[in-house]
Image (cartoon, rainbow, N blue to C red):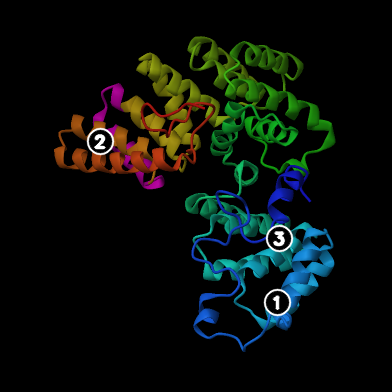
Amino acid sequence: MDRFIASALVAVTLVAGLPSAAAAQAPPPGAAARPTAAQKRTPPPPRTAASPTKFDALAAEADKAREAKQLDRAVELYRQALTIRPAWDEGRWNLGTALYELEQFGDARDAFRRVLAKHPENGTAWVFKGLCEFQLKNYDSALSDLIEAKARGVVGGQAMADVARYHSAIMLSRIGRFDQALYILDDFGLEGNDAPGVIEAMGLAVLRMPMLPSDLPGGRRELVLMAGRARFLQAARQMAGAQSAFELLTSRYPDTPNVHYAYGVFLLAEEPDKAIEVFQRELKVTPQNTYAKLQIAFAYIRKGEYDKALPWARDGAAEAPTDYVARHAYGQALLESGDVPAAVTELEAGAKLAPDSPIMHFVLAKAYRRAGRTADAEKAQQAFLRLDKQFREARTGSESIGGIPLDAPPGSRQP
C-alpha cells in the first residue's frame, strides 16, 4: 500500500459504518443503516431477541471480525450477509474498506462502485474508489474520481482530505500539469505538513518531472528532495530559508533542467530583475524551455516594459501555439504595445484554448474595450466574473506557470 496513505487510512477503513463529518462511521447522506427504508416498509418475518435472523448473526460476526482485524474472515461474512440483504449499505461500505486494507483493490473498487450507484453524493466513497483506481494504475479514472470527490465534499477527518489532495497532485504532475499540482501541494506547506511524501511530490512538480514518486530513480532522489524542501519553505512563507535552499540547489545542480527555473519563480514576486537573470541561466541549460521565456515576458509586462516583453512572448507563442498561457503572454504584450487588432486575435485564440480560464476573459475584455467592441467587452467581463466566482469557491488551483498562477483572477491567493 502507498506509504503516504497507509497510516492515514487506518482510522477510516476500520470504523463501523460510513464516514461522516463528526466521526468516520455514519452512513453516507441519504443512506439507510440496518435495516433499510424498503425493509421497514416490508417488515421481515417475526423474530425474537433470542432468535436473531441469519442476516443479523452474520452481520454481527462480520463486525466483530473486522474490529478484531480478522479482515479475511470479515470479508467472507460481509459477503454472505450481503447475499441475503444486497441493499445493506453499511455492510457494503465495510466490505469495501476491508478489501482495501487487504489490498484487494479490484474487489474494493467494485464495492465502492455499488455504494456510489446508490449514493453518488458521497465524496468519501469517491475518494476510496479513486484510491482503488490509483492502486490498479487506472490513473485517468483515479484523477477523475478524486476531482469528483472534491466537488462532492470529503468527510472523515483531515487525514482523508490530505490523502485525496496528495493523490490528486501527484497524478496532475504525472500528466504534466505541474503548476496545478503545486497549487494543491502548497497548501501542505501553509499547514506545516512536511511529510516525506509531500516533499517528494513537491520536488517532482517544481522540477517538472512527469512521473509518480514511486517511479523516481534512486539516483535522482537527493535532487528531488532538495528541490521539494526549497519549495516547501517557499509555500510555508519561510522566505529566508527558501532562498538559501534554492541557492544551494542551483549551486549543487547548476546544469540540471528546471533548477534555475524553480529559483527564478521563487524570485519573481520580490526580485523580478534577478528572476529574469536566473531564467536566462535556465535557457542556457535548456534553450527549449518555453516556460522560462514566458516567465521573462510576464516579468517585463509586470514591470511595464512591454517592448522588452514582446520578443520573449512572441518566441513563446511560436514555440507553443496550442498553449493558452503563451497566447495570453503574447496577446497581452501586443495589447500593451499598442497593436490592439493583433492582441485581440491572440487573446481570442487563448480563450478558445482555455474557455474556463478567468484571466483569459479578463484580459480579452480589456482588449475588446480598447478596440471599441463594447458588447463583446461586456460579454467577456461577465464570463470573467462567473469564472472568477467559481475559481474562488473551488480553490482547486489553476493552469499556470511557475509559482505565480497566471491564470488566477486578479487578487487571488499566490502559491
Relative to 395, is 63 above or below?
below
Q: Is residue 165 rendered magenta in the image?
A: no
Q: Which mark is residue 365?
A: 2
How far separated are the C-alphas under marks 3 and 1?
20 Å
Q: Are marks 3 and 2 in contact (CB under 8 Å)?
A: no
User: Mark 1 or mark 2, which is nearer to you?
Assistant: 1
Q: Earlier in the sequence, mark 3 or mark 1?
A: 1
Relative to 158, is 366 above or below?
above
Q: Are marks 1 and 2 in contact (CB under 8 Å)?
A: no
Q: Is residue 409 visible?
A: yes
* Residue identifier under label 3: 97
Q: In the rendered structure, which segment of residues is drawn in magenta?
A: 335-355
How far separated are the C-alphas under marks 1 and 2?
65 Å
Element marked by disc 1: helix
Element marked by disc 3: helix
Q: Is residue 169 visible?
A: no
